[in-house]
Image (cartoon, rainbow, N blue to C red):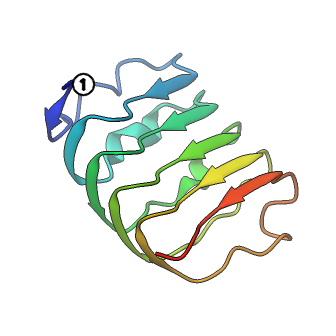
Amino acid sequence: MGFQGHISLNTLSRLSALKVLSLRSNAISGSFPLNLVELKNLTTLYLQFNELSGSLPNLSVWNDLSIVDLSNNGFNGSILLKLSYLTALNLSNNSLSGDILDTDIPGLHHYDKLIN
């Protein structure tokens, strides 16, 4: 097993040039780490198979984010996304509600939000 528990608020925010963040298949718990929004150059975000919970943040702070996988966590609430560069999105196996319209994400090629 890799990381466990909460992600410290100042741990990752120092990596300002980071483009790909992969923390999948750990035991990271708590809400979505809000300090990640400080990683303005992020293009790929993999946080699947953790123990994250609560509502999803506004992911539109990342202008270049193209791949997001937040599947197999405990996220709940509504899906609110408007990301023009997003090409792949996996939100399956959470407790999310709502739909994502094609007009919200014009470049989306792969979308997986199976029945939650």
- Along the line of sight, which residue is nearer the eye, 44 or 111? 111
Which residue is the extreme one toward the bottom?
98
- Along the line of sight, which residue is nearer the eye, 25 or 65? 25
Is residue 55 shown left or right of residue 68? left
Question: Which residue is found at the position 71% from the left and 40% from the top?
Answer: 66
Is residue 110 shown left or right of residue 16? right
Is residue 65 shown left or right of residue 79? right
Question: Which residue is found at the position 28% from the left and 54% from the top?
Answer: 52
10 Å crowding of disc 1: few (<14), some (14-19), many (20+):
few
Image coordinates of residue 107 in percent, x first then y, are 86, 51
Which residue is the extreme one toward the left?
5
Amino acid carrying mark 1 in the image:
Thr
Image coordinates of residue 59 in percent, x first then y, are 55, 54
Pointer 1 residue: 11
Question: Which residue is found at the position 53% from the left and 16% from the top?
Answer: 17
Which quarter of the image is occupied by the N terminus?
top left
Dividing the picture into quarters, in which one does residue 10 lie?
Answer: top left
Question: In the rendered image of this protein, does residue 72 appear above or below residue 22?
Answer: below
